[in-house]
Image (cartoon, helix red, strand yellow):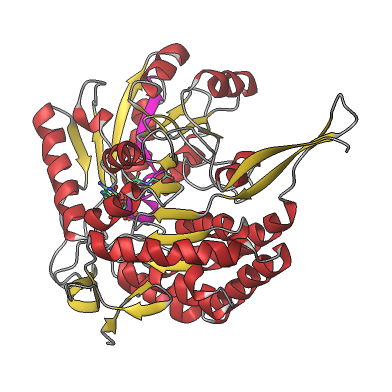
Amino acid sequence: MTVHQGLNFVGGAWVPASSGATFRRRNPADPGDVVGEFPESSGADAGAAVAGAVEGAALWGAAPAEKRADVLEAAARWLEERADRLVAELVREEGKTRAEAAMEISRTPRNLRFYAAEAHRITGQSHPAADGGIVYTRREPVGVVGAITPWNFPLNIPSRKIGPALAAGNAVVFKPSPVTPLLAQRLVEALLAGGLPPLAIALVHGGADAGAAVAADERVGAVTFTGSTRAGRAVHAAVGPTRRAQLEMGGKNPVVVLDDADLERAAQLIVKGAFGLSGQACTGTSRVIAHEAVHDELLGRVARAAEALVVGDGRRDGVDMGPLAADFQLEKFLGYVRIGEEEGARLVTGGRRLSGAGYGGGYFVRPAVFDGVTPRMRIAREEIFGPVLAFQRASGFDEAIELANGTPYGLSAGIVTRDLDRALEFARRCESGLVKVNQPTSGMAMTVPFGGLKESSTQTFKEQAGPSMMLFYTQEKSVYISPR
Ligand code: NAD
Protein backbone atom coordinates (compact mmCIF):
# COMPACT_ATOMS: atom_id res chain seq x y z
CA MET A 1 0.00 0.00 0.00
CA THR A 2 1.12 3.56 -0.67
CA VAL A 3 2.82 5.36 2.19
CA HIS A 4 1.79 8.98 1.65
CA GLN A 5 4.42 11.65 2.19
CA GLY A 6 2.42 14.51 3.63
CA LEU A 7 3.50 18.14 3.74
CA ASN A 8 2.37 21.38 5.30
CA PHE A 9 1.05 24.09 3.03
CA VAL A 10 2.63 27.33 4.22
CA GLY A 11 3.10 30.65 2.42
CA GLY A 12 1.63 29.15 -0.74
CA ALA A 13 4.01 26.16 -0.96
CA TRP A 14 4.07 22.50 0.13
CA VAL A 15 6.85 22.24 2.73
CA PRO A 16 8.05 19.94 5.51
CA ALA A 17 8.15 21.10 9.14
CA SER A 18 10.99 23.58 9.64
CA SER A 19 12.59 21.15 12.10
CA GLY A 20 12.22 18.25 9.66
CA ALA A 21 10.28 16.30 12.35
CA THR A 22 7.54 13.93 11.21
CA PHE A 23 4.93 11.62 12.66
CA ARG A 24 3.41 8.47 11.20
CA ARG A 25 -0.26 7.69 10.87
CA ARG A 26 -1.22 4.01 10.89
CA ASN A 27 -4.34 2.17 9.75
CA PRO A 28 -6.31 1.38 12.95
CA ALA A 29 -7.60 -1.87 11.44
CA ASP A 30 -4.03 -2.98 10.74
CA PRO A 31 -1.46 -0.85 12.58
CA GLY A 32 1.37 -2.45 10.57
CA ASP A 33 0.01 -0.54 7.57
CA VAL A 34 1.54 2.96 7.59
CA VAL A 35 -0.90 5.34 5.89
CA GLY A 36 1.61 8.15 5.73
CA GLU A 37 4.27 10.31 7.25
CA PHE A 38 3.40 13.94 8.02
CA PRO A 39 5.17 17.03 9.37
CA GLU A 40 5.21 17.41 13.14
CA SER A 41 4.81 21.18 13.17
CA SER A 42 6.08 23.55 15.82
CA GLY A 43 4.97 27.00 16.87
CA ALA A 44 7.41 28.42 14.30
CA ASP A 45 5.62 26.54 11.49
CA ALA A 46 2.28 27.82 12.73
CA GLY A 47 3.68 31.37 12.84
CA ALA A 48 4.92 31.11 9.25
CA ALA A 49 1.53 29.79 8.19
CA VAL A 50 -0.23 32.74 9.82
CA ALA A 51 2.19 35.22 8.20
CA GLY A 52 1.35 33.85 4.74
CA ALA A 53 -2.36 33.88 5.55
CA VAL A 54 -2.21 37.56 6.54
CA GLU A 55 -1.13 38.30 2.94
CA GLY A 56 -3.70 35.85 1.62
CA ALA A 57 -6.49 37.56 3.55
CA ALA A 58 -5.77 40.85 1.79
CA LEU A 59 -5.97 39.15 -1.63
CA TRP A 60 -8.93 36.89 -1.02
CA GLY A 61 -10.89 39.51 0.92
CA ALA A 62 -10.85 41.64 -2.23
CA ALA A 63 -12.19 38.83 -4.45
CA PRO A 64 -15.81 39.28 -5.53
CA ALA A 65 -18.48 36.98 -4.12
CA GLU A 66 -18.85 35.24 -7.51
CA LYS A 67 -15.21 34.20 -7.44
CA ARG A 68 -15.40 32.94 -3.85
CA ALA A 69 -18.47 30.91 -4.68
CA ASP A 70 -16.91 29.53 -7.88
CA VAL A 71 -13.87 28.26 -5.99
CA LEU A 72 -15.97 26.43 -3.41
CA GLU A 73 -18.12 24.91 -6.17
CA ALA A 74 -15.06 23.76 -8.07
CA ALA A 75 -13.55 22.24 -4.92
CA ALA A 76 -16.82 20.38 -4.38
CA ARG A 77 -16.62 18.94 -7.89
CA TRP A 78 -12.98 17.91 -7.37
CA LEU A 79 -13.99 15.92 -4.29
CA GLU A 80 -16.96 14.32 -6.04
CA GLU A 81 -14.84 13.23 -9.00
CA ARG A 82 -12.49 11.43 -6.58
CA ALA A 83 -15.17 10.02 -4.26
CA ASP A 84 -14.18 6.35 -4.62
CA ARG A 85 -10.53 7.02 -3.82
CA LEU A 86 -11.44 9.28 -0.91
CA VAL A 87 -13.79 6.67 0.57
CA ALA A 88 -10.97 4.11 0.47
CA GLU A 89 -8.54 6.56 2.07
CA LEU A 90 -10.99 7.48 4.81
CA VAL A 91 -11.63 3.83 5.66
CA ARG A 92 -7.90 3.19 5.79
CA GLU A 93 -6.97 6.28 7.76
CA GLU A 94 -9.78 6.57 10.30
CA GLY A 95 -11.28 3.08 10.39
CA LYS A 96 -14.80 3.97 9.34
CA THR A 97 -16.87 1.38 7.50
CA ARG A 98 -17.27 1.98 3.79
CA ALA A 99 -20.90 3.10 4.27
CA GLU A 100 -19.87 5.59 6.97
CA ALA A 101 -17.04 6.89 4.83
CA ALA A 102 -19.28 7.21 1.76
CA MET A 103 -21.73 9.26 3.79
CA GLU A 104 -19.01 11.68 4.83
CA ILE A 105 -17.50 11.95 1.37
CA SER A 106 -20.89 12.73 -0.14
CA ARG A 107 -21.70 15.37 2.47
CA THR A 108 -18.54 17.42 2.26
CA PRO A 109 -19.07 18.71 -1.31
CA ARG A 110 -22.67 19.52 -0.42
CA ASN A 111 -21.43 21.59 2.51
CA LEU A 112 -19.04 23.47 0.25
CA ARG A 113 -21.87 24.22 -2.19
CA PHE A 114 -24.10 25.40 0.63
CA TYR A 115 -21.42 27.85 1.81
CA ALA A 116 -20.68 28.91 -1.77
CA ALA A 117 -24.24 30.24 -1.88
CA GLU A 118 -23.67 32.08 1.41
CA ALA A 119 -20.95 34.13 -0.28
CA HIS A 120 -23.75 35.91 -2.16
CA ARG A 121 -25.85 36.56 0.91
CA ILE A 122 -23.50 38.77 2.91
CA THR A 123 -25.44 41.99 3.29
CA GLY A 124 -25.71 44.99 5.59
CA GLN A 125 -28.48 47.25 6.78
CA SER A 126 -29.27 50.88 6.14
CA HIS A 127 -30.78 53.26 8.69
CA PRO A 128 -32.28 56.71 8.22
CA ALA A 129 -30.30 59.52 9.80
CA ALA A 130 -31.74 62.69 11.38
CA ASP A 131 -29.77 65.01 9.11
CA GLY A 132 -31.10 63.44 5.94
CA GLY A 133 -27.99 61.34 5.45
CA ILE A 134 -27.67 57.62 5.92
CA VAL A 135 -26.11 55.16 8.28
CA TYR A 136 -25.29 51.77 6.85
CA THR A 137 -23.58 48.67 8.12
CA ARG A 138 -21.07 46.67 6.16
CA ARG A 139 -19.87 43.18 6.89
CA GLU A 140 -16.22 42.49 6.17
CA PRO A 141 -14.08 39.41 6.54
CA VAL A 142 -12.36 39.02 9.90
CA GLY A 143 -9.00 38.45 8.18
CA VAL A 144 -7.29 35.23 9.23
CA VAL A 145 -9.36 32.39 10.68
CA GLY A 146 -7.76 29.51 12.59
CA ALA A 147 -9.61 26.18 12.14
CA ILE A 148 -8.66 23.45 14.62
CA THR A 149 -10.46 20.17 14.07
CA PRO A 150 -10.88 16.61 15.42
CA TRP A 151 -10.48 13.32 13.59
CA ASN A 152 -13.93 11.79 13.64
CA PHE A 153 -15.17 13.69 10.56
CA PRO A 154 -11.89 14.76 8.97
CA LEU A 155 -13.46 16.27 5.85
CA ASN A 156 -16.95 17.14 6.95
CA ILE A 157 -16.17 19.18 10.07
CA PRO A 158 -13.36 21.17 8.42
CA SER A 159 -15.63 21.86 5.44
CA ARG A 160 -18.18 23.41 7.83
CA LYS A 161 -15.51 25.79 9.08
CA ILE A 162 -13.29 26.46 6.07
CA GLY A 163 -16.28 26.67 3.69
CA PRO A 164 -18.01 29.61 5.40
CA ALA A 165 -14.70 31.24 6.36
CA LEU A 166 -13.61 31.35 2.72
CA ALA A 167 -17.08 32.27 1.49
CA ALA A 168 -16.83 35.37 3.69
CA GLY A 169 -13.42 36.29 2.23
CA ASN A 170 -11.10 35.20 5.03
CA ALA A 171 -7.84 33.33 4.72
CA VAL A 172 -7.68 30.13 6.79
CA VAL A 173 -4.94 28.44 8.79
CA PHE A 174 -6.11 24.83 9.11
CA LYS A 175 -4.72 22.67 11.93
CA PRO A 176 -6.31 19.23 11.51
CA SER A 177 -6.06 16.28 13.87
CA PRO A 178 -2.89 14.19 13.62
CA VAL A 179 -5.15 11.12 13.52
CA THR A 180 -6.49 12.01 10.05
CA PRO A 181 -3.85 14.14 8.31
CA LEU A 182 -4.28 12.60 4.85
CA LEU A 183 -7.95 13.50 4.50
CA ALA A 184 -7.17 17.02 5.74
CA GLN A 185 -4.57 17.33 3.02
CA ARG A 186 -7.14 16.21 0.42
CA LEU A 187 -9.46 19.05 1.40
CA VAL A 188 -6.68 21.59 0.89
CA GLU A 189 -5.80 20.00 -2.45
CA ALA A 190 -9.45 20.30 -3.50
CA LEU A 191 -9.55 24.01 -2.65
CA LEU A 192 -6.31 24.72 -4.50
CA ALA A 193 -7.49 22.72 -7.51
CA GLY A 194 -10.68 24.77 -7.36
CA GLY A 195 -8.66 27.96 -7.90
CA LEU A 196 -8.20 29.29 -4.37
CA PRO A 197 -5.23 31.70 -4.26
CA PRO A 198 -2.51 29.67 -2.51
CA LEU A 199 -1.92 32.24 0.23
CA ALA A 200 -5.58 32.09 1.25
CA ILE A 201 -5.17 28.65 2.83
CA ALA A 202 -2.48 27.18 5.05
CA LEU A 203 -2.27 23.65 6.40
CA VAL A 204 -0.27 22.95 9.54
CA HIS A 205 -0.08 19.28 10.49
CA GLY A 206 0.73 18.19 14.03
CA GLY A 207 -0.72 18.04 17.50
CA ALA A 208 -1.66 20.24 20.42
CA ASP A 209 1.45 22.44 20.23
CA ALA A 210 0.72 23.50 16.67
CA GLY A 211 -2.94 24.09 17.56
CA ALA A 212 -2.03 26.12 20.61
CA ALA A 213 0.30 28.30 18.53
CA VAL A 214 -2.45 29.00 15.98
CA ALA A 215 -4.93 29.88 18.74
CA ALA A 216 -2.47 32.15 20.57
CA ASP A 217 -1.39 34.11 17.48
CA GLU A 218 -2.83 37.63 17.73
CA ARG A 219 -2.90 37.92 13.93
CA VAL A 220 -5.61 35.23 13.87
CA GLY A 221 -8.85 37.16 14.26
CA ALA A 222 -11.17 34.22 14.87
CA VAL A 223 -10.61 30.65 15.99
CA THR A 224 -13.12 27.94 15.23
CA PHE A 225 -12.47 24.77 17.19
CA THR A 226 -14.15 21.38 17.44
CA GLY A 227 -12.79 18.79 19.84
CA SER A 228 -12.76 17.82 23.49
CA THR A 229 -13.91 20.17 26.22
CA ARG A 230 -10.44 19.95 27.80
CA ALA A 231 -8.65 21.21 24.67
CA GLY A 232 -11.45 23.69 24.01
CA ARG A 233 -10.87 25.33 27.37
CA ALA A 234 -7.19 25.79 26.49
CA VAL A 235 -8.10 27.29 23.12
CA HIS A 236 -10.59 29.64 24.74
CA ALA A 237 -8.00 30.86 27.24
CA ALA A 238 -5.43 31.39 24.45
CA VAL A 239 -7.85 33.39 22.30
CA GLY A 240 -8.68 35.75 25.16
CA PRO A 241 -11.32 38.47 25.30
CA THR A 242 -10.41 40.61 22.27
CA ARG A 243 -10.58 37.98 19.57
CA ARG A 244 -13.44 35.63 18.82
CA ALA A 245 -13.75 31.91 19.38
CA GLN A 246 -16.37 29.36 18.39
CA LEU A 247 -15.95 26.10 20.28
CA GLU A 248 -17.95 22.90 19.82
CA MET A 249 -16.90 20.26 22.31
CA GLY A 250 -17.77 17.00 24.03
CA GLY A 251 -21.04 15.33 24.95
CA LYS A 252 -22.65 12.68 27.14
CA ASN A 253 -25.82 12.31 25.16
CA PRO A 254 -28.87 10.59 26.66
CA VAL A 255 -31.90 8.92 25.13
CA VAL A 256 -34.98 8.86 27.36
CA VAL A 257 -37.33 5.97 26.63
CA LEU A 258 -40.82 6.40 28.07
CA ASP A 259 -43.26 3.64 28.97
CA ASP A 260 -45.36 4.14 25.82
CA ALA A 261 -42.40 3.78 23.42
CA ASP A 262 -42.18 1.36 20.51
CA LEU A 263 -39.34 -0.66 22.00
CA GLU A 264 -38.15 -2.20 18.75
CA ARG A 265 -37.76 1.22 17.24
CA ALA A 266 -36.14 2.52 20.42
CA ALA A 267 -33.59 -0.31 20.42
CA GLN A 268 -32.71 0.29 16.78
CA LEU A 269 -32.14 4.00 17.13
CA ILE A 270 -30.21 3.56 20.36
CA VAL A 271 -27.85 1.01 18.80
CA LYS A 272 -27.37 3.20 15.74
CA GLY A 273 -26.67 6.26 17.88
CA ALA A 274 -24.41 4.47 20.34
CA PHE A 275 -22.34 2.23 18.09
CA GLY A 276 -22.38 3.99 14.73
CA LEU A 277 -18.86 5.30 13.91
CA SER A 278 -17.70 2.84 16.60
CA GLY A 279 -19.22 5.13 19.24
CA GLN A 280 -16.96 7.98 18.14
CA ALA A 281 -19.53 10.63 17.22
CA CYS A 282 -19.81 13.76 19.36
CA THR A 283 -23.60 13.41 19.22
CA GLY A 284 -23.49 9.62 19.75
CA THR A 285 -25.70 8.06 22.42
CA SER A 286 -23.84 7.22 25.61
CA ARG A 287 -26.71 6.90 28.09
CA VAL A 288 -30.16 5.29 27.98
CA ILE A 289 -32.61 6.49 30.61
CA ALA A 290 -35.40 3.95 30.53
CA HIS A 291 -38.74 4.12 32.34
CA GLU A 292 -38.78 1.27 34.85
CA ALA A 293 -41.83 -0.30 33.17
CA VAL A 294 -39.86 -0.92 29.95
CA HIS A 295 -36.30 -0.95 31.24
CA ASP A 296 -35.65 -4.69 31.31
CA GLU A 297 -37.23 -5.47 27.97
CA LEU A 298 -35.42 -2.58 26.30
CA LEU A 299 -32.09 -3.59 27.84
CA GLY A 300 -32.52 -7.13 26.47
CA ARG A 301 -33.32 -5.85 22.99
CA VAL A 302 -30.39 -3.40 22.94
CA ALA A 303 -27.95 -6.01 24.24
CA ARG A 304 -29.05 -8.52 21.59
CA ALA A 305 -28.77 -5.92 18.83
CA ALA A 306 -25.29 -4.94 20.07
CA GLU A 307 -24.22 -8.58 20.05
CA ALA A 308 -25.49 -8.98 16.48
CA LEU A 309 -23.25 -6.18 15.14
CA VAL A 310 -20.49 -7.44 12.88
CA VAL A 311 -17.20 -5.87 13.97
CA GLY A 312 -14.31 -5.86 11.53
CA ASP A 313 -12.14 -4.07 9.01
CA GLY A 314 -14.26 -1.39 7.33
CA ARG A 315 -12.93 -2.50 3.95
CA ARG A 316 -14.82 -5.81 4.29
CA ASP A 317 -18.41 -6.23 3.13
CA GLY A 318 -21.06 -6.71 5.78
CA VAL A 319 -19.15 -4.98 8.57
CA ASP A 320 -21.32 -2.82 10.86
CA MET A 321 -18.63 -1.43 13.16
CA GLY A 322 -15.02 -0.70 12.32
CA PRO A 323 -12.08 -0.45 14.73
CA LEU A 324 -11.51 2.35 17.19
CA ALA A 325 -9.52 5.09 15.49
CA ALA A 326 -6.30 4.93 17.49
CA ASP A 327 -4.41 3.12 20.24
CA PHE A 328 -5.34 5.87 22.72
CA GLN A 329 -9.00 5.33 21.88
CA LEU A 330 -8.63 1.61 22.60
CA GLU A 331 -6.94 2.33 25.94
CA LYS A 332 -9.67 4.80 26.88
CA PHE A 333 -12.40 2.29 26.00
CA LEU A 334 -10.83 -0.51 28.03
CA GLY A 335 -10.07 1.91 30.88
CA TYR A 336 -13.70 3.06 31.14
CA VAL A 337 -15.00 -0.53 30.99
CA ARG A 338 -12.74 -1.28 33.94
CA ILE A 339 -13.92 1.87 35.76
CA GLY A 340 -17.56 0.90 35.19
CA GLU A 341 -17.02 -2.57 36.64
CA GLU A 342 -15.09 -1.17 39.61
CA GLU A 343 -17.85 1.37 40.25
CA GLY A 344 -20.35 -1.48 40.55
CA ALA A 345 -22.20 -1.20 37.24
CA ARG A 346 -23.12 -4.52 35.59
CA LEU A 347 -21.46 -5.23 32.24
CA VAL A 348 -24.28 -6.87 30.29
CA THR A 349 -22.36 -7.50 27.08
CA GLY A 350 -19.15 -6.63 25.24
CA GLY A 351 -16.39 -4.46 26.65
CA ARG A 352 -13.50 -6.61 25.45
CA ARG A 353 -10.86 -6.29 22.75
CA LEU A 354 -11.18 -8.64 19.78
CA SER A 355 -8.12 -10.46 18.58
CA GLY A 356 -7.25 -13.48 16.48
CA ALA A 357 -8.31 -14.34 12.95
CA GLY A 358 -9.60 -11.34 11.03
CA TYR A 359 -8.59 -8.85 13.71
CA GLY A 360 -4.78 -8.91 13.69
CA GLY A 361 -3.43 -6.12 15.85
CA GLY A 362 -6.30 -3.79 14.95
CA TYR A 363 -8.15 -1.77 17.58
CA PHE A 364 -11.34 -3.87 17.42
CA VAL A 365 -13.70 -4.17 20.37
CA ARG A 366 -17.12 -5.55 21.16
CA PRO A 367 -19.50 -2.69 22.02
CA ALA A 368 -20.18 -2.51 25.77
CA VAL A 369 -23.57 -2.19 27.46
CA PHE A 370 -23.69 -1.45 31.20
CA ASP A 371 -26.77 -1.70 33.44
CA GLY A 372 -27.37 -0.38 36.95
CA VAL A 373 -25.53 2.87 36.27
CA THR A 374 -26.13 5.57 38.88
CA PRO A 375 -25.72 9.32 38.31
CA ARG A 376 -22.54 9.68 40.37
CA MET A 377 -20.63 6.99 38.46
CA ARG A 378 -17.95 8.25 36.12
CA ILE A 379 -19.36 6.20 33.25
CA ALA A 380 -22.58 8.21 33.68
CA ARG A 381 -20.87 11.60 33.69
CA GLU A 382 -17.67 11.58 31.67
CA GLU A 383 -17.38 11.53 27.91
CA ILE A 384 -15.88 8.22 26.77
CA PHE A 385 -16.13 8.75 23.02
CA GLY A 386 -16.26 5.05 22.35
CA PRO A 387 -18.85 2.26 22.11
CA VAL A 388 -19.91 2.18 25.77
CA LEU A 389 -23.60 2.53 26.62
CA ALA A 390 -24.84 3.13 30.19
CA PHE A 391 -28.40 2.18 31.18
CA GLN A 392 -30.06 4.25 33.91
CA ARG A 393 -33.51 3.49 35.37
CA ALA A 394 -36.16 6.21 35.92
CA SER A 395 -39.40 5.89 37.86
CA GLY A 396 -41.18 8.58 35.81
CA PHE A 397 -40.92 11.44 33.36
CA ASP A 398 -39.59 14.05 35.80
CA GLU A 399 -36.86 11.79 37.10
CA ALA A 400 -35.91 10.89 33.51
CA ILE A 401 -35.43 14.58 32.67
CA GLU A 402 -33.42 15.14 35.84
CA LEU A 403 -31.14 12.23 34.95
CA ALA A 404 -30.83 13.40 31.34
CA ASN A 405 -29.71 16.85 32.54
CA GLY A 406 -27.42 15.44 35.21
CA THR A 407 -24.07 15.86 33.46
CA PRO A 408 -21.95 18.92 32.70
CA TYR A 409 -22.53 18.38 28.97
CA GLY A 410 -25.43 19.49 26.79
CA LEU A 411 -24.88 18.50 23.17
CA SER A 412 -27.68 16.18 22.01
CA ALA A 413 -30.57 14.50 23.83
CA GLY A 414 -33.27 12.18 22.55
CA ILE A 415 -36.66 10.93 23.67
CA VAL A 416 -38.63 7.95 22.39
CA THR A 417 -42.35 8.25 22.99
CA ARG A 418 -45.69 8.32 21.20
CA ASP A 419 -46.83 11.22 23.38
CA LEU A 420 -46.30 14.51 21.57
CA ASP A 421 -47.03 16.60 24.68
CA ARG A 422 -44.27 14.88 26.57
CA ALA A 423 -41.89 15.13 23.64
CA LEU A 424 -42.47 18.88 23.46
CA GLU A 425 -42.09 19.25 27.22
CA PHE A 426 -38.81 17.31 26.99
CA ALA A 427 -37.64 19.70 24.25
CA ARG A 428 -38.37 22.62 26.60
CA ARG A 429 -36.80 21.18 29.73
CA CYS A 430 -33.76 19.28 28.49
CA GLU A 431 -30.47 21.12 28.65
CA SER A 432 -29.02 20.35 25.25
CA GLY A 433 -28.46 22.15 21.98
CA LEU A 434 -29.98 19.36 19.86
CA VAL A 435 -33.20 17.54 20.76
CA LYS A 436 -34.21 14.41 18.89
CA VAL A 437 -37.70 12.90 19.10
CA ASN A 438 -37.87 9.27 17.96
CA GLN A 439 -34.49 9.67 16.23
CA PRO A 440 -30.91 8.74 17.12
CA THR A 441 -29.05 11.46 19.07
CA SER A 442 -26.52 11.48 16.24
CA GLY A 443 -27.14 12.81 12.74
CA MET A 444 -28.16 16.28 11.70
CA ALA A 445 -29.24 18.33 8.73
CA MET A 446 -26.67 20.53 7.02
CA THR A 447 -29.10 23.46 6.79
CA VAL A 448 -29.85 23.69 10.52
CA PRO A 449 -27.90 25.59 13.21
CA PHE A 450 -25.72 23.20 15.20
CA GLY A 451 -24.18 23.55 18.63
CA GLY A 452 -24.37 22.42 22.23
CA LEU A 453 -25.20 23.98 25.58
CA LYS A 454 -23.36 23.88 28.92
CA GLU A 455 -19.82 22.46 28.65
CA SER A 456 -20.43 21.23 25.11
CA SER A 457 -20.06 24.66 23.56
CA THR A 458 -19.10 28.28 24.08
CA GLN A 459 -22.54 29.08 22.64
CA THR A 460 -20.99 32.15 21.11
CA PHE A 461 -22.03 31.37 17.56
CA LYS A 462 -23.91 28.40 16.17
CA GLU A 463 -22.07 26.34 13.60
CA GLN A 464 -23.09 24.88 10.30
CA ALA A 465 -26.00 27.06 9.16
CA GLY A 466 -28.29 29.79 10.30
CA PRO A 467 -27.74 33.50 10.81
CA SER A 468 -25.00 33.32 13.43
CA MET A 469 -22.69 31.17 11.32
CA MET A 470 -21.73 33.89 8.82
CA LEU A 471 -21.68 36.48 11.61
CA PHE A 472 -18.77 34.57 13.14
CA TYR A 473 -16.72 34.88 9.97
CA THR A 474 -17.47 38.56 9.35
CA GLN A 475 -17.08 41.72 11.35
CA GLU A 476 -19.41 44.67 11.17
CA LYS A 477 -18.85 48.41 10.75
CA SER A 478 -21.46 51.17 11.00
CA VAL A 479 -20.82 53.96 8.49
CA TYR A 480 -22.39 57.41 9.04
CA ILE A 481 -22.79 59.69 6.01
CA SER A 482 -24.15 63.23 6.10
CA PRO A 483 -25.21 65.24 3.05
CA ARG A 484 -22.67 67.91 2.18
P1 NAD B 1 -9.01 16.83 20.88
O1 NAD B 1 -9.61 17.88 21.74
O2 NAD B 1 -8.01 15.95 21.44
O3 NAD B 1 -8.35 17.51 19.58
C1 NAD B 1 -9.08 18.36 18.71
C2 NAD B 1 -8.09 19.25 17.96
O4 NAD B 1 -7.51 20.16 18.89
C3 NAD B 1 -6.92 18.48 17.35
O5 NAD B 1 -6.58 19.08 16.12
C4 NAD B 1 -5.81 18.67 18.37
O6 NAD B 1 -4.54 18.52 17.85
C5 NAD B 1 -6.08 20.08 18.84
N1 NAD B 1 -5.63 20.42 20.19
C6 NAD B 1 -5.50 19.60 21.26
N2 NAD B 1 -5.10 20.30 22.33
C7 NAD B 1 -4.99 21.60 21.93
C8 NAD B 1 -4.62 22.80 22.58
N3 NAD B 1 -4.27 22.83 23.86
N4 NAD B 1 -4.63 23.96 21.87
C9 NAD B 1 -5.00 23.95 20.55
N5 NAD B 1 -5.34 22.83 19.88
C10 NAD B 1 -5.34 21.67 20.57
O7 NAD B 1 -10.25 16.00 20.29
P2 NAD B 1 -10.21 14.72 19.32
O8 NAD B 1 -9.75 13.53 20.07
O9 NAD B 1 -9.55 15.08 18.05
O10 NAD B 1 -11.77 14.56 19.00
C11 NAD B 1 -12.69 14.01 19.88
C12 NAD B 1 -13.42 15.08 20.67
O11 NAD B 1 -14.04 15.99 19.77
C13 NAD B 1 -14.54 14.53 21.52
O12 NAD B 1 -14.53 15.18 22.77
C14 NAD B 1 -15.78 14.88 20.75
O13 NAD B 1 -16.96 15.00 21.52
C15 NAD B 1 -15.40 16.18 20.15
N6 NAD B 1 -16.20 16.50 18.99
C16 NAD B 1 -17.15 17.45 19.13
C17 NAD B 1 -17.97 17.77 18.07
C18 NAD B 1 -19.02 18.83 18.19
O14 NAD B 1 -19.48 19.32 17.17
N7 NAD B 1 -19.41 19.20 19.40
C19 NAD B 1 -17.79 17.11 16.84
C20 NAD B 1 -16.80 16.13 16.73
C21 NAD B 1 -16.00 15.84 17.82
Q: Nearer the viewer, residue 382 or 231?
A: 231
Q: Nearer the viewer, residue 194 or 106?
A: 194
Using residue 226 as the reference point, say whether residue 361 is left or right of it: left
Residue 276 is one of the magenta-drawn residues: yes
Does the rendering let one see residue 447? yes
- In the image, residue 121 sits, relative to residue 87, either above or below, namely above
Q: Nearer the viewer, residue 31 or 16?
A: 16
Using residue 270 as the reference point, say whether residue 446 is left or right of it: right
- In the image, residue 484 sits, relative to residue 312, either above or below, namely above
Residue closest to the far right: 132
Using residue 397 as the reference point, say whether residue 2 is left or right of it: left
Residue 122 is one of the magenta-drawn residues: no
Using residue 316 as the reference point, say whether residue 197 is left or right of it: right
- In the image, residue 205 sits, relative to residue 452, either above or below, namely below
Q: Which residues are magenta?
A: 274-292
Residue at 37% x, 45% y: name it: 274
Residue at 60% x, 39% y: name it: 468
Q: Position of residue 108 (x, y in %)?
A: 54, 64
User: Residue 14 appears in which quarter of the rendering?
Assistant: bottom left
Residue closest to the far left: 342
- In the image, residue 122 sits, relative to residue 187, either above or below, namely above
Q: Position of residue 463 (x, y in %)?
A: 53, 44
Residue at 58% x, 19% y: name it: 422
